[in-house]
Image (tube, rainbow, N blue to C red):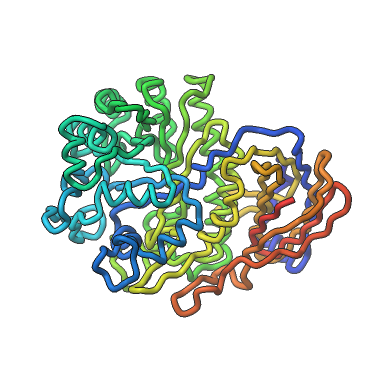
């Protein structure tokens, strides 16, 4: 992709109501790698109301539930086709002792969640509840193991409890109601070991990784995919040291990246200026440079790309909603979040030669969530709709796109493209294309030209609102919702689309 010279924000704002025209060459005859479905992964942590009131209410709750899982949330997640779900953290993972979360719920010990708001954790949602949920959703479980405060033996026995057919741990699992082992593929050896997971140096963590991972065994045909706790955004030295010292003992290294301009003043999720909107969009799109830089380091030590990169935490992070616990990270979700999600996912789709998973933070009631709940009410966020609209990319073959567009400059000086596009060919042979227009003040007229395909039909959806601050509430749950997209014309090998300002579009050819 090529960009023209930057346009200042003032110049951009002066061009209100003027439509930009962009030509996109779609090279469907030159397929790339498969886009793993795990790129559309989710993250659930014992944080605020993500688990309790979000996913789990218990079987005795007056809120309609399926064996304790909220029925409305479960059905929404099922429709989302969640491919992988990470749990129990996050920072909580390195204070979580799994044996507290098994056995009769009424006798499980209680603990203070010192990471997130000092609330009492009753451990009623534990290993069985999580892994059974993953089975019901058809999602791969991704377990984050406790390295910060746990022992090698503790993690080793957890793996055995979950995946072995015989032995003391399997007998204990059966006594707790599950005879057959679960299939558990992904195991994270610690989380954010540079910070809340132990404040370690990369050298020290590398030695711990080698030790802990040694005792995470493969039982009875269950093959573990081991993930080393990787860097935070721009910490390229952490990745370098891990690649040097851990190397091929890991199947993947992780990376975390949040769209935050100022950690001390994150700003409101719903009340923001146009300039603040552009700053967040620009910060989100900076993930492409960050991915590229980590990939270069990994390529130096692993040119065959046998070690994967997992972006297992990402998304927006704003101030909590007024009147809520600051440690619960509950924030609303607007069309701004939808644009961040769409443009980020389009970037991830292009990096899957190395990037094999991404897990947005988090699935319910925390940060850039899919779903918000309150009592017996539930609402789907704009970000949920983007993930559902983009699900056609899961396990599809990436298709290269080439275009030239304007480059915009945010008030903080960051540059980003005025258009976001990615394409893939689905298993059914259809061409699936997702686009995002981040401009607040002008439409984009986009002409897609295929190498050889003459589209027989076109269908699509659009997510758009008159105000970028629009969001869904329990009283008005469909302020932002997808609609059928009809703004296109077909002529031979070309399809011309009109994207309204600040819109997300998905089309199938």
Q: Which of 257 and 415 is in front in this view?
A: 257
Say which quarter of the image contains residue 242. top left
Say which quarter of the image contains residue 428. top right
Name the residue located 76 percent from the left edge and 38 percent from the top edge: 27
Say which quarter of the image contains residue 445. bottom right
Q: Which of 49 and 256 is in front in this view?
A: 49
Place of residue 367 in the rendered image (x, y in percent of width and height, measured from the top left)? 40, 58
Q: Nearer the viewer, residue 419 or 252?
A: 252
> Looking at the picture, does residue 28 appear above or below residue 390?
above
Place of residue 98 in the rendered image (x, y in percent of width and height, measured from the top left)? 20, 44
Name the residue located 58 percent from the left edge and 58 percent from the top edge: 339
In the image as oriented, which residue stretches furthest toward the right? 492
Name the residue located 78 percent from the left edge and 65 percent from the top edge: 18
Residue 192 placement, left or right of 470: left
Name the residue located 26 percent from the left edge and 32 percent from the top edge: 164
Place of residue 475 in the rendered image (x, y in percent of width and height, measured from the top left)? 46, 80
In the image as oriented, which residue stretches furthest toward the bottom? 475
> Looking at the picture, does residue 439 appear above or below residue 162?
below
Q: In this view of the protein, can residue 174 be seen by the observer?
A: yes
Q: In which quarter of the image is the N terminus?
A: top right
Residue 11 placement, left or right of 256: right
Place of residue 46 in the rendered image (x, y in percent of width and height, measured from the top left)? 28, 54
Q: In this view of the protein, can residue 198 be seen by the observer?
A: no
Residue 102 placement, left or right of 214: left
């Amino acid at each position: 992709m090529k960009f023209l010279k930057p346009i200042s924000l003032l110049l951009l704002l002066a061009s209100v109501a003027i439509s930009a025209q962009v030509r996109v060459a779609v090279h469907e005859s030159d397929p790339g790698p498969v886009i793993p479905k795990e790129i559309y992964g989710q993250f659930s942590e014992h944080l605020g109301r993500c688990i309790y009131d979000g996913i789990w209410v218990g079987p005795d709750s007056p809120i309609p539930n399926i064996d304790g899982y909220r029925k409305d949330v479960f059905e929404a997640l099922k429709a989302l086709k969640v491919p992988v779900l990470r749990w129990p953290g996050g920072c909580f993972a390195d204070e979580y002792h799994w044996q507290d979360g098994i056995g009769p719920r009424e006798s499980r010990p209680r603990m203070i969640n010192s990471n997130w708001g000092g609330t009492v954790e009753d451990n009623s949602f534990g290993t069985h509840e999580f892994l059974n949920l993953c089975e019901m959703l058809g999602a791969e479980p991704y377990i984050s193991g406790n390295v910060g405060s746990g022992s090698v033996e503790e993690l080793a026995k957890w793996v055995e409890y979950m995946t072995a057919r015989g032995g003391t741990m399997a007998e204990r699992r059966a006594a707790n109601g599950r005879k057959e082992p679960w299939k558990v593929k992904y195991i994270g050896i610690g989380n954010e070991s540079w910070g809340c997971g132990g404040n370690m140096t990369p050298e020290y963590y590398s030695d711990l990784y080698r030790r802990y991972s040694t005792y995470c065994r493969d039982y009875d045909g269950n093959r573990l995919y081991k993930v080393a706790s990787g860097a935070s955004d721009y910490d390229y030295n952490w990745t370098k040291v891990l690649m040097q010292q851990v190397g091929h003992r890991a199947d993947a290294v992780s990376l975390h990246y949040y769209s935050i301009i100022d950690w001390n003043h994150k700003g409101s999720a719903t009340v923001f200026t146009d300039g603040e909107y552009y700053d967040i969009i620009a910060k989100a799109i900076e993930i492409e440079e960050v991915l590229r830089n980590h990939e270069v380091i990994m390529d130096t030590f692993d040119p065959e790309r046998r070690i994967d990169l997992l972006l297992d935490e990402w998304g927006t992070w704003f101030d909590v909603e007024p009147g809520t616990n600051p440690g619960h990270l509950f924030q609303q979700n607007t069309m701004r979040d939808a644009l961040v999600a769409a443009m980020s996912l389009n970037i991830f789709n292009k990096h899957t030669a190395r990037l094999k998973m991404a897990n947005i933070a988090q699935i319910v009631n925390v940060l850039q969530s899919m779903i918000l709940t309150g009592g017996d009410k539930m609402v789907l966020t704009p970000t949920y709709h983007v993930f559902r609209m983009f699900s056609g990319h899961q396990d599809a073959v990436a298709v290269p796109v080439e275009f030239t567009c304007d480059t915009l400059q945010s008030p903080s000086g960051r540059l980003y493209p005025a258009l976001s596009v990615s394409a893939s060919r689905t298993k059914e042979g259809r061409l699936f294309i997702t686009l995002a227009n981040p401009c607040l003040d002008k439409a984009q007229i986009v002409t897609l030209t295929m190498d050889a395909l003459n589209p027989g039909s076109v269908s699509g959806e659009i997510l758009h609102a008159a105000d970028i601050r629009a969001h869904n509430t329990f009283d008005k749950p469909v302020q932002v919702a997808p609609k059928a997209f009809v703004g296109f014309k077909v002529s031979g090998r070309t399809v011309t689309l009109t994207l309204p300002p600040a819109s997300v579009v998905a089309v199938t050819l």
